Structures are given as structure tokens and as C-alpha cells.
Image (spheres, rainbow, N blue to C red):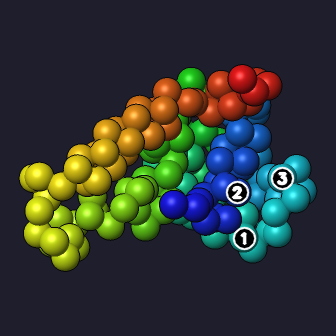
Amino acid sequence: MQLNKTTDYAVRILVFLGRKSDFVSSDEISRATSISKNYTIKILRILTSEEIVKMKRGIKGGFLLNKPPSEINLYEIFVAMERTIKINQCLDNEESCNLYENDICPVRNFYLILQQEFEEKLKSMTIEKLGIFKGG
């Protein structure tokens, strides 16, 4: 699995918004993240429809996180932005297995464990943590 660019940009936008306490215009978000304005607006529409950010119209309007950065995790963002976050098609749809051995397949069983660990890691990483992340 490789994240699409839109998801990566969404995370960067949310980290930026996580450092703000008031509504921020799409222009400011675009400039601060070096993402084109049109692409920024496209991403913000998705994030708004998924209720990760809220939008306020008008002269003092803009975008703001819908909840504290400590309560927004990567899992929630990935699910909102990606078509799937499953590492293999057989985890998305059991009928995708051409061997029809879902219950006994050792490879699928390993993928299930890996998928669970992946999702747990995503759920443990919040926008707040990413905003101060130094590695390790």
C-alpha cells in the first residue's frame, strides 16, 4: 500500500490547523503547506464532509479542526481519504481470494495480524503527536 498524495497533503493540512486556535483561510493554508489552492480546497471539502474540520463562511471565516488535535488520529484521516487502507485485497473482500481458503490461508492470517498492527499504530498517532514528532 502506498498513500496517495491527497492523503499525505490532508495530514499536513491537519497538522498545520492543529497549531491554530482560530479559523484559517484556504489561502493561508495553501501558502503554509505549499499545496496549490485548488488542491487545498479539494482536500478541505473532503475533510469538512467527514467532519474532521469545520468551515465558517465570511470575512473572518475559514477552516478549523472540529475537535482537539489530540483526538484526531491517522486512522480516521486515512479512512476518510483513501479508497481502502487494507494491505491486501483479500482483507477488503473475502471473495477476492482466488484460492477460496480464507479460513486456513497462512498468508491471509499473517496479513490480518499485520493489518491489525497497522491500524493500531495509525490510531495511536494523533495530529497533536505529529505536530511535535521528531522521530524514533
Q: Which mark is residue 9?
A: 2
Rendering coords of residue 72 (x, y %)? 52, 34
- Choose the circle earlier in sequence order: 1 or 2: 2
Residue underneath mark 1:
39
The part of the image, by quadrant, that contains residue 99 is bottom left
Crowdedness near tag 2: few (<14), some (14–19) or many (≥20) residues, C-alpha within 10 Å: some
- Using the numbered discs, state the Cα–Cα distance from disc 2 to disc 3 in whole angstroms: 8 Å
32 up-or-down from 113: above or below: below
Residue 100, position as x, y percentages in the image: 11, 69
Q: Secondary structure at mark 1?
A: helix
For marks 1 and 3, the one nearer the N-term is 3
Relative horizontal placement of residue 5, taking residue 79 as reference (left or right) = right
Q: Are marks 1 and 2 in contact (CB under 8 Å)?
A: yes
Q: Looking at this view, is 13 or 107 the one in front?
A: 107
Residue tagged 3: 33
Amino acid type, label 1? Tyr
